[in-house]
Amino acid sequence: MDGIAIPQPIGRPRKRPNRLAGDKGYSYPTIRRWLWAHGIAPVIPRKSNQRPGPGTFDTQSYRRRSVIEQCVGWLKECRRIGTRFEKLAISFVAMFKLAMIQRYLRLLFSDRA
C-alpha cells in the first residue's frame, strides 16, 4: 500500500485510495481495521461465517473490480508474463507494455469489438 501514487491534476500524488476492493479472501477484521484507520473504505464482501459489521457493502464498486480480474486473467494467458521469464524488473515492465500494446491492437482491429 505504501508504493501507491495516485496522480492528481494539481499538487503531489495522493498516497491513499478512497476505496479498496478485494474478494472474500481479504475479509479479516485486522485488514478492515487497518483500512479504516488509514481512511480507506473497504469494498470487501463478508464471509458467510462472519457477523455483519459497520458500514454498507458497495456492490457497484465491487462489480467494477471484474475489469481488473479479467485483465489479470488475460495477462496470465501470455506465457512470458505469467511465468515471469524476465528476471529484471525493467525487462518485465517492457514485456508487460508490449503485451498491453498487443491487446489494444487486437481489440482495435477486431471485427467483434
Image: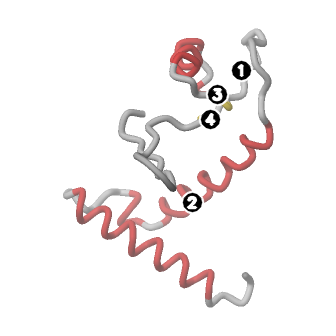
In this picture, is 105 found above or below 17?
A: below
The residue mark sitting in front, 1 or 4, is: 4
How busy is the neighbourhood of tag 4: few (under 14 within 10 Å), some, or many (20 plus)?
some
Mark closest to the chain's N terminus, 1 or 4: 4
Label 3–label 4 contact, CB within 8 A: yes
Q: In the image, 13: left or right of 70?
A: left
Residue found at x 71% / y 20%: 47
Distance from the alpha carbon under mark 3 to that under mark 4? 5 Å
Read off the residue under disc 1.
Answer: 47
Q: Is residue 17 above or below residue 13?
A: above
State the residue at coordinates (19%, 58%): 88
Q: Nearer the viewer, mark 1 or mark 3?
A: 3
Q: Earlier in the sequence, mark 3 or mark 4?
A: 4
x, y percent for residue 11: 43, 48
Q: Which residue is mark 4?
A: 19
Residue 33 drawn at (x, y percent): 56, 14
Give the distance between the C-alpha atoms of the residues marked 2 and 3, in whole angstroms. 23 Å
Q: Look at the image and tell me in which quarter the N terminus lies.
A: top left
Q: Earlier in the sequence, mark 1 or mark 3?
A: 3
